[in-house]
Image (cartoon, rainbow, N blue to C red):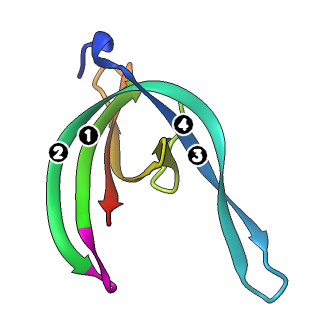
């Protein structure tokens, strides 16, 4: 899927945690579970307005070594950028995981 030498970006994998808000609802937060090296490659950019939030959505493809139990509920963090996972799959040899992510630029 990728040359391991291209994995030059350090990302933090965060898992969702939920707690009772005391009023019948849920407070959702995230906790870091791992820090990984990854290859981050552009996929596409789409400009638009969604829920009164003008900005662009940047789509990226991220490849990292397998070994992390990821789901669409996890997210990746690179400094102030928060990547939302939209799709994921393992490579044929199961050595790598390919993620499709997006983040919003406002």
Dot 4 crowding, Cα within 10 Å, few <14, some 14–19, many 20+ = some
Disc 1 crowd rating (10 Å Cα; few below 14, some 14-19, many 20+) is some
Between the C-alphas of marks 1 and 2, the distance is: 6 Å
In the drawing, does residue 101 fall left or right of residue 79? left
Residue 21 on the magenta segment: no
Circles 1, 2 touching at the beta carbon (< 8 Å) = yes
- Pointer 3 with pointer 4, Cβ within 8 A: yes
Range of residues picked out in magenta:
50-55
Residue 66 seen in render: no
User: What's the distance in space between the residues labelled 4 and 2, CA to CA?
Assistant: 20 Å
Left or right placement of residue 16 versus residue 4 in this view? right
Residue 93 or residue 81, whichever sits in front: 81
> Mark 3 sits on what residue?
14
Circle 4 sits on which residue? Answer: 12
Residue 57 percent coordinates (x, y): 25, 61
Quarter of the view holding residue 9: top left
Magenta span main SS: strand
Q: Earlier in the sequence, mark 2 or mark 3?
A: 3
Residue 52 percent location from the top left of the image: 32, 86
| Residue 6: percent from left, percent from top | 28, 17
Residue indicated by mark 1:
61
As drawn, is 2 to the left or to the right of 8? left
């Amino acid at each position: 899927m990728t040359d391991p030498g291209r994995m030059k970006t350090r990302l933090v994998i965060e898992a969702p945690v939920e707690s009772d808000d005391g009023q019948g609802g849920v407070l959702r937060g995230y906790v870091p579970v791992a820090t990984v090296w990854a290859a981050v490659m552009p996929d596409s950019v789409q400009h638009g307005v969604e829920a009164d939030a003008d900005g662009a959505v940047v789509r990226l493809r991220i490849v990292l070594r397998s070994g992390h139990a990821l789901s669409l509920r996890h997210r990746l963090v690179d400094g102030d950028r928060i990547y939302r996972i939209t799709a994921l799959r393992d490579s044929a040899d199961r050595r790598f995981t390919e993620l499709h992510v997006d983040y919003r630029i406002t």
